[in-house]
Image: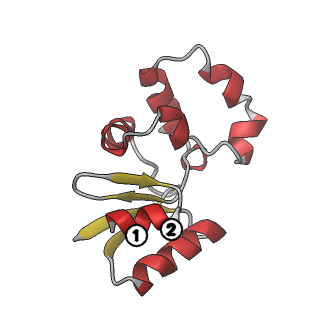
């Protein structure tokens, strides 16, 4: 199985996750989340595969999220508007993301990764 690994290379959690993938012989294509930000369509597809609330796709601890008051803005936004917002800046998107054929993992939770990968 080969997966897509969407990461920000300077992120310590992403580095740990990348090492985990290599240590567990998981084949992956690497994608820089800022240089190649996920599109609204990709985010919609990933969200559907993940089974997670859309809120989990936001990097709530990031500066872009905090400095722009995104938390308050989300309250009145439709899902379509949230996808569009996430697609504007890779730093708004929670990382790392692993995209498999029939699943998506958001963030690095080792137990969850062991079960899926």
Quadrant location of the C terminus in the rendered image: bottom left
User: Mark 1 near mark 2, Cβ–Cβ under 8 Å?
Assistant: yes
The answer to which image quadrant residue 40 occupies is top left
Q: Examine the rendering and report whether any part of residue 37 can be seen.
A: yes
- Specify few, some or many for label 2: CA neighbours under 10 Å numbering under 14, 14-19, or 20 or more: few
CA gap, disc 1 and disc 2: 6 Å
Residue tagged by mark 2? Answer: 110
Left or right: where does residue 105 sit relative to residue 100?
right
What scheme was used to colour the molecule? secondary structure
Question: Residue 109 appears at what percent x and percent y?
Answer: 52, 62
* Tag shown at residue 92: none
Position above or below: 73 against 55 = above
At horizontal 57% and vertical 75% (from top left) the residue drawn is 16
Question: Residue 17 appears at what percent x and percent y?
Answer: 51, 71
Position above or below: 11 against 50 = below
Quadrant location of the N terminus in the rendered image: bottom left
Question: Depth check: 5 or 101 in front?
Answer: 101
Question: Depth check: 40 or 4 in front?
Answer: 4
Callout 2: SS: helix
Residue tagged by mark 1? Answer: 114
């Amino acid at each position: 199985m080969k997966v897509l690994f969407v990461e920000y290379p300077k992120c310590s959690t992403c580095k740990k996750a990348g090492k985990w993938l290599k240590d567990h012989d998981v084949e992956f294509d690497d994608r820089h989340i800022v240089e190649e930000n996920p599109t609204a369509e990709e985010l919609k597809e990933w969200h559907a595969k993940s089974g997670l609330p859309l809120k989990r796709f936001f990097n709530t601890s990031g500066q872009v999220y905090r400095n722009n008051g995104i938390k308050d803005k989300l309250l009145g936004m439709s899902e379509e508007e949230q996808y569009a917002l996430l697609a504007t800046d890779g730093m708004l998107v929670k990382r790392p993301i692993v995209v498999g054929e029939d699943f998506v993992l958001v963030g690095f939770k080792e137990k969850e990764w062991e079960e899926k990968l």
